[in-house]
């Protein structure tokens, strides 16, 4: 009998345990903690850097503003999935950045319309112009999110060219006596000649890799989008926009595209293009860059510099001129290039939003407003005075080498630094008119970090920064950039379907075209597969968007 | 089947078993069958905004979209091919390894080998594929060795050719999981009565005869059960490894159903496509295990149900 | 099944002696020696191939992150540093995560083992009238899946979100583990159960006193599978307990750290300021992998004795 009771109890315990949720709900909605500080929660549907619960600067900001935000980031999921789960559950954090899922959040009615609040907060009001605020209005006429990035206060402070370019190692230019390189043919010519004269690196055994192409997954832009720049157009990302006729042009099929891929094909057969280009992973590519063997490539600065250039420096290869400088290359001589554009880019497709779960919208927005105060902004992006930076007699901020080192330390960052990196922020010049809003814009800081060969190279070309190597152009037009639209396309529309298919086909065929024994035949096969994707559907949707943007912009003229 | 007639005496004796089974079945309904309501998504244009209850009903449209897409048919082929190759390779290797390990005379060595063999299971795919990429690169160990012995004159770019992709994936699976998978067989071997070996030895059986007549029959039920379970999983050939090893040149053979779903479903905010593909996989799995279970039953082997 | 198994034979001791003698006699045979050499060589090759990725990970974890970007680290670090481990171990909430992970591993393993064993016991009774149906019911659960969102909604309505229970309750019973135990139990001769029944033992007694003691090897195997699964899982923590940091797990914290490092290594700040001694996603991943492997390697020998034994120790004992 006893045994039966025992098993009956076990049985009941098992059943009941199924329903036993013993959790307490996490604090949300601006709950006030024991120190009298309001605590908000935030979820960003992008990967990010988490900071410690007792982070020092976060605490300082909390004392000054009376608010603190516990941030969580996307881990191991896509933004759409994470946002979809939140919507299904119907509970949100106070702040949210939906990434690619922003539109879903708006459609689900999860976000608070901000228009009525904006005027109450001067820093937020000042953050965008009327026209920019209007660009953020959704289909119901309200504003729901504030894009956080690329907002330039005062004068722009760009030292590095953060975007795409044909890069070349300083040692190649030095060997050739710093010639003027303007076209793709000259670029490859130089690389060929250098490699013939110097097939190895300074150690005499390690062979150079004359030109490599990164093709790993979404990073294949290093192969595919050069034709738009070669034709002298800016980075609209997915298409070329003819500024006179306001016509969308497909850069995949232009004559320049044919010339560019034909050149790569020739160079591939000459052994200049790295035969592992199309199979290497990003890690392998960075390893090659880091070893200083790669003479040149197309890439975006942020994609290789923060890892590859660092490794070059730490291995002492910078003194051999293994670091990269960008070249102003176009398809023909004498064309205006737009590799670098000045000014910010307003990406309207996502931003910081406040959800309907937030119980104190005013306090939340007050906090966003406070974060844009110069004092708090300095705390976010420079740190604590005399701990993270010093102020010179001229009022300029600078960092000692020790400060730089600790600023790069992961553990130190988590414990000390709090940039609230997905809240609205400025780049450009500080309100004091001298310093840069963020430490990476401070010129002196920039020059101190340059190696001798790079300085010499800059001098030879009469440049002081990477940007001056390329020259800079103004914002091309009111439509710019078109990629903020193509990024939001989904297979719900024919254009979006075509866009996704085009990506697949290009991934598969472009490497084949470059490797083909008979280029013309390879190109014809590619074009046949490409046409089957119906690129015209995509182009026509882009054209519609272009016209919509121009009509919107015309209202402010 | 004939035995299933209701019998009150049986019922009484088995009362305790039935109560337990009922509790467990309720648990199963709650945690495994209730979420299947989500399958409705495959027949809707599901949006999180409208939820399961109010999304637009589209019938079999999503299935039609899937099966009219040539690339979906191609990913089914890839998934199936890799599933079968991986199954065969990992399965045979695990059994072989377990038996050979069991035959090792030196007990200390046996334990060390066994401990080391399961360690790669704890490495993530990103680490394993990184090492594999290194080993197979133009200057990697494989090409270096083959060049050294003159088997090839030019380094082979393994990841540029479709023909190498499936074997590489199979090898990676074997490499990572053989030792781990073998554990189950090792446990099964311990259940074999030593007196059987003794008897076999007295009958003059050699090592091979003992493996063939004692060890293998001893672990056959385990082999059969795992084989049946894994046959149901051939369409779950994976996602991560193909994603990490694949590239544009081999995407025709590297993409699996799961990768397709990510690309054409989840990344496009379309949950229905993924659910439809999931239902398809479930149906194939269930058909496969019912079929093979029936065959196993016919041959009087251990079976799933 | 397995009628060939003769369990009523002589006691273990004499068997061992007999086997020992048999083995000694065999040692002389030339074919046998050849087999042993071949087997030994095979095992050495196997060990080298499987040990390499682990040693490589160890070497990378002890190497400077920026330096490792250049590649070419094989078995030995080139620029030695503890930095990667320091970075991992200084992660906020790591201790909370470790405590929760240990708790979920212990509780989860015990729960899973008990429930799976009970279920396996039930369906392995040959005369149990619903054995086939219950088996089929569970086998199907292996191949169906309602999807992320419906499951999330279910757990939320059951109050499992923001709770510890979500780690141990939903995944408690699994068809795979149940079938593994069932197969083993079916190998145990019916005669044992029958004689116990004649002595008046009920099913509970048979399960606890007769069957379970014989199932130690398979219990150890399943415990290992469940424990390793629990130890390594982080997705549930991310999905159901994202906002409840008191229930974070070790692996989830490590995933977040990895994500932080990847994010930082691609920021302008890092480039300007880094130099010697910085960490990279690869180096931190390696250190995190080694750290999570260590406890398993330490505990493993205690389980291993149940399924790696000499021939003479094996077998179903009475």
Image (cartoon, grey):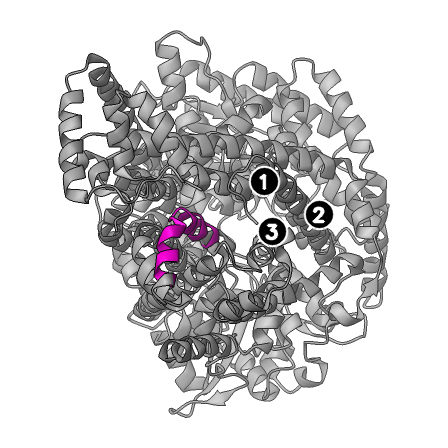
Q: Secondary structure at mark 3?
A: loop
User: Does mark 1 fall on the same chain as mark 2?
Assistant: yes
Instruction: Work out which quarter of the rendered image holds the C terminus of chain A and state it.
Output: bottom right
Q: Which residue is mark 1?
A: B297
Q: Is residue C191 above or below residue C99?
A: above
Comparing labels 3 and 1, the label whose residue is closer to the camera: 1
Q: Is residue A199 above or below residue C101?
A: above
Any magenta on residue C183? yes
Q: Which residue is mark 3?
A: C143
Query: Where is residue A504, by image quadrant?
Result: top right
Identified at 66% across, 71% down, the residue is A88
The front one of A342 and A408 is A408
Label 3 with label 2: CB-CB less than 8 Å: no
Magenta-tinted stretch: C178-197
Query: Where is residue A224, by image quadrant?
Result: top right
Task: Let me know if residue C103 appears in the view.
Answer: yes
Q: Which mark is residue B142?
A: none
Q: Residue C112 location in percent, x, y?
A: 41, 63
Q: Residues within 10 Å of mark 1 (few under 14, many from 20)?
A: some
Q: Secondary structure at mark 2?
A: helix
Q: Residue B18 location in percent, x, y?
A: 53, 68
Q: Residue A409 location in percent, x, y?
A: 32, 58
The front one of C264 and C227 is C227
The chain carrying label 3 is C
Q: Residue B234 location in percent, x, y?
A: 59, 39
- Measured in 3D between alpha carbons, the distance from the residue under mark 2 to the one under mark 1, in whole angstroms, is 26 Å
Q: Which residue is mark 2?
A: B280
The front one of C302 and B15 is B15
Q: Secondary structure at mark 1?
A: helix
């Amino acid at each position: 009998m006893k045994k039966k009771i025992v098993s009956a109890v076990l049985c009941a315990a098992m059943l009941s345990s199924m329903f036993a949720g013993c959790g307490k709900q996490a604090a949300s909605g601006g709950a006030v903690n024991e120190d009298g500080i309001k605590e908000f929660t935030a979820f960003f549907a992008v990967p990010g850097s988490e900071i410690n619960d007792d982070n020092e600067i976060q605490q300082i900001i909390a004392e000054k503003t009376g608010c603190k935000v516990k941030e969580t980031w996307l881990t191991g999921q896509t933004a759409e999935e994470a946002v979809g789960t939140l919507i299904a559950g119907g509970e949100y954090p106070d702040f949210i950045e939906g990434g690619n899922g922003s539109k879903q959040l708006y459609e689900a009615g999860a976000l608070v319309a901000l228009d009525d609040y904006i005027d109450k907060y001067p820093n937020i009001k000042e953050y965008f112009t009327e026209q920019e605020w209007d660009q953020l209005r959704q289909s119901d006429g309200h504003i729901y999110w504030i894009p956080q990035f690329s907002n330039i206060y005062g004068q722009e402070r760009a030292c590095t060219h953060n975007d795409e370019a044909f890069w070349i190692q300083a040692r190649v230019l030095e060997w050739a006596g710093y010639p003027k390189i303007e076209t793709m043919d000259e670029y490859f010519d130089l690389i060929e000649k250098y490699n013939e004269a110097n097939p190895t690196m300074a150690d005499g055994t390690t062979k150079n890799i004359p030109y490599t192409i990164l093709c790993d997954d979404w990073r294949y832009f290093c192969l595919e989008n050069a034709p738009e720049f070669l034709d002298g157009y800016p980075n609209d990302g997915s298409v070329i926009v003819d500024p006179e006729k306001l016509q969308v042009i497909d850069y995949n099929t232009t004559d320049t595209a044919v010339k560019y891929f034909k050149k790569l094909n020739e160079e591939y057969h000459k052994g200049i293009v790295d035969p592992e280009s199309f199979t290497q992973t990003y890690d392998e590519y960075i390893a090659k860059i880091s070893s200083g063997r790669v003479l040149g490539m197309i890439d975006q600065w942020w994609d290789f510099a923060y890892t590859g250039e660092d490794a070059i420096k730490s291995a002492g290869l910078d003194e051999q001129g293994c670091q990269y400088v960008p070249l102003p290359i176009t398809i023909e001589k004498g064309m205006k290039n737009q590799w670098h554009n000045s000014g910010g880019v307003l990406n309207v497709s996502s931003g910081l939003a406040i959800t309907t779960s937030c119980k104190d919208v005013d306090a939340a927005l007050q906090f966003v407003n406070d974060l844009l105060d110069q004092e708090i902004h300095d705390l976010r992006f420079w740190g604590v005075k005399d701990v993270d930076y010093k102020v010179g007699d001229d009022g300029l901020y600078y960092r000692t080498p020790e400060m730089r080192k600790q600023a790069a330390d992961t553990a130190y960052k988590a414990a000390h630094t709090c940039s609230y990196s997905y809240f609205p922020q400025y780049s450009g010049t500080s309100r004091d008119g001298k310093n840069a809003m963020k430490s990476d814009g401070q010129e002196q800081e920039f020059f101190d970090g340059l190696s001798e060969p790079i300085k010499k190279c800059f001098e030879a070309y009469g440049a002081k920064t990477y940007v001056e190597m390329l020259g800079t152009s103004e914002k091309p037009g009111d439509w710019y950039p078109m990629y903020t639209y193509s990024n939001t396309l989904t297979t719900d529309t024919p254009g979006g379907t075509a866009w996704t298919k085009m990506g697949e086909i290009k991934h598969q065929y472009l490497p084949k075209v470059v490797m083909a024994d008979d280029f013309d035949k390879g190109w014809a096969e590619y074009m046949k597969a490409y046409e089957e994707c119906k690129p015209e559907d995509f182009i026509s949707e882009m054209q519609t968007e272009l016209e919509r943007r121009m009509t919107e912009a015309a209202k402010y003229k | 089947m004939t035995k299933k007639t209701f019998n009150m005496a049986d019922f009484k004796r088995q009362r305790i078993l039935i109560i337990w089974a009922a509790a467990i079945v309720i648990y199963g309904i709650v945690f495994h069958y209730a979420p299947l309501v989500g399958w409705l998504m495959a027949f809707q244009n599901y949006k999180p905004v409208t939820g399961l209850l109010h999304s637009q009903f589209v019938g079999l449209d999503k299935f039609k979209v899937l099966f009219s897409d040539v690339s979906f048919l191609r990913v089914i082929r890839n998934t199936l091919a890799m599933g079968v190759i991986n199954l065969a390779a990992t399965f045979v290797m695990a059994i072989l390894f377990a038996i050979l390990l069991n035959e090792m005379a030196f007990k200390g060595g046996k334990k060390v080998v066994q401990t080391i063999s399961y360690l790669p299971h704890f490495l993530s795919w990103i680490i394993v594929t990184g090492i594999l990429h290194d080993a197979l690169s133009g200057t990697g160990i494989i090409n270096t060795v083959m060049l050294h012995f003159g088997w090839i004159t030019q380094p082979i770019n393994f990841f540029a050719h479709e023909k190498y992709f499936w074997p590489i994936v199979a090898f990676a699976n074997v490499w990572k999981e053989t030792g781990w998978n073998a554990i189950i067989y090792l446990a099964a071997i311990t259940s074999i009565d030593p007196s059987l070996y003794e008897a076999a030895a007295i009958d003059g059986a050699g090592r091979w005869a003992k493996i063939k007549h004692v060890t293998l029959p001893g672990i056959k039920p385990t082999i059969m059960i795992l084989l049946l379970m894994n046959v149901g999983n051939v369409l779950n050939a994976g996602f991560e490894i193909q994603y990490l090893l694949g590239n544009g040149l081999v995407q025709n053979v590297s993409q699996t159903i799961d990768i397709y779903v990510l690309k054409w479903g989840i990344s496009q905010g379309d949950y229905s496509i993924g659910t439809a593909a999931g239902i398809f996989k479930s149906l194939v799995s269930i058909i496969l295990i019912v079929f093979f279970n029936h065959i196993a039953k016919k041959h009087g082997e251990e079976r799933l149900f | 099944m397995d009628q060939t198994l003769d369990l009523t034979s002589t006691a273990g001791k004499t068997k061992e002696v007999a086997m020992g003698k048999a083995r000694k006699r065999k040692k002389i045979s030339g074919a046998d020696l050849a087999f042993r050499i071949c087997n030994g060589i095979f095992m050495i090759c196997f060990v080298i191939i499987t040990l390499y990725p682990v040693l490589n990970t160890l070497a990378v974890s002890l190497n400077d992150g920026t330096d490792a970007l250049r590649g070419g680290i094989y078995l030995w670090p080139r620029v030695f540093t503890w930095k990667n481990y320091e970075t991992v171990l200084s992660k906020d909430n790591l201790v909370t995560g470790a405590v929760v992970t240990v708790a979920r591993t212990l509780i989860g393993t015990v729960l899973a083992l008990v429930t799976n064993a009970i279920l396996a016991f039930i369906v392995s009774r040959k005369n149990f009238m619903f054995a086939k149906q219950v088996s089929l019911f569970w086998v199907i659960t292996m191949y169906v899946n309602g999807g992320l969102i419906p499951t999330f909604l279910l757990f939320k309505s059951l109050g499992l979100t923001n709770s510890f229970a979500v780690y141990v309750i939903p995944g408690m019973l699994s068809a795979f583990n149940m079938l593994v135990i069932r197969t083993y139990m079916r190998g145990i001769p019916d005669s044992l159960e029958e004689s116990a029944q004649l002595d008046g033992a009920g099913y509970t007694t048979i399960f606890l006193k007769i069957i379970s003691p014989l199932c130690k090897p398979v219990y150890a195997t399943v415990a290992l599978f469940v424990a390793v699964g629990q130890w390594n899982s982080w997705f549930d923590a991310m999905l159901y307990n994202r906002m409840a940091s008191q229930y974070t797990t070790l692996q989830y914290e490590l995933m977040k750290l990895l994500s932080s490092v990847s994010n930082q290594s691609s920021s302008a700040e890092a480039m300007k300021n880094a130099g010697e001694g910085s960490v990279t996603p690869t180096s931190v991943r390696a250190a995190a992998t080694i750290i999570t492997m260590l406890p398993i390697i330490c505990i493993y020998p205690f389980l291993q004795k149940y399924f790696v034994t000499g021939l003479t120790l094996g077998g179903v004992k009475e």
